[in-house]
Amino acid sequence: MAAHDTGAGVRAEFDDGSEAFGDLLIGCDGVHSTVRRLIDPTAPAPSYAGLINTGGYASGVSVDTEPGSYEMIFGKRAFFGYLKADDGQVWWFSNVPRRDEPARGELAAVSGEEWRRRMLELYAEDAGPAVSLIEATPEIMPMTAIHSIPHLPRWHNDRMIVVGDAAHAPSPSSGQGASLSIEDGVPSACGTCPPRKRRSPSSLPNAVPGSSASSRPPPASTTTRRPARSAGCSATPSCR
């Protein structure tokens, strides 16, 4: 992918040969953002957080929490979080410590049933519903390595900006990913699309309130600085 400032807007060119034109290019393309590199080719690469992550959806398990309330457990050997939906289904995730960063394709080579076996072992001594939820989950999601971006020196230019995990990816155990994305999106939308009249901004610093690096909202920088120790445990052989 490539992007070019045309003077009147931005033209994005995609790998399949297609193009798109607009006033701005907003990169909400995740921790491994392409737009971040277009804005700044020297931008720091995401840092491995020392954790691998999976999750799933379980039905028929009773949990002692209100619908919409997120519960997070610092287990002896791994971190576990879950949320009860209005229909009683429970959505859960697991952060498993691992010191060395997995090689490409290594985690995908392990079957979901094998990950289930390993996680049942990890949470066997913990209080809470982790074991029951993992057992009741029809399909374990693919395990992935967690990366974070604690600081991004340059996250916009005149026509391009990154938001959400593309700009400041925190660990999932912080529970702040969606919140920070909303914090980015609201001022961006308010700055570029005022009521009753949409305008084409000549530059992001003038269009988006707080778009200078020095005025980054404190919650974003504070949350993304929290270390991987939020998992509440250290790596063990069974985490691999």
Image: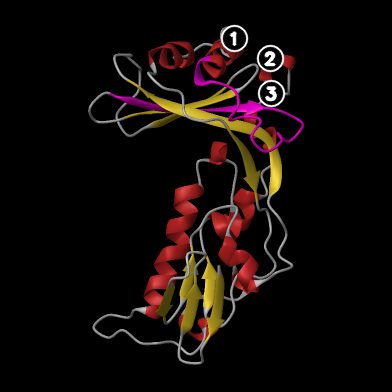
User: Does the image show residue 72?
Assistant: no
Which image quadrant is residue 188 in?
bottom left
Q: Which residue is mark 1?
A: 121
Amino acid under disc 2: Ser
The residue stretch that appears in magenta: 89-113
Instruction: Give percent across and percent down for residue 236.
Output: 73, 18
Q: Which residue is mark 2?
A: 238
Q: Element under label 3?
A: loop
Query: For the residue marked with disc 3, what is the amino acid?
Result: Cys
* Quadrant including the C terminus: top right
Residue drawn at x 48%, y 73% is 25
Q: Nearer the viewer, residue 208 or 42?
A: 42
Per the model, the C-alpha gap separating discs 1 and 3 is: 15 Å
Q: Residue at x 59, y 74 (%)?
A: 156
Closer to the chain start, of discs 2 and 3, is: 3
What amino acid is found at the position of numbered circle 1 in the picture?
Glu
Q: Which mark is residue 233?
A: 3
Q: How much space separates mark 2 and mark 3, taking CA atoms? A: 13 Å
| Mark found first going from the N terminus, 2 or 1 | 1
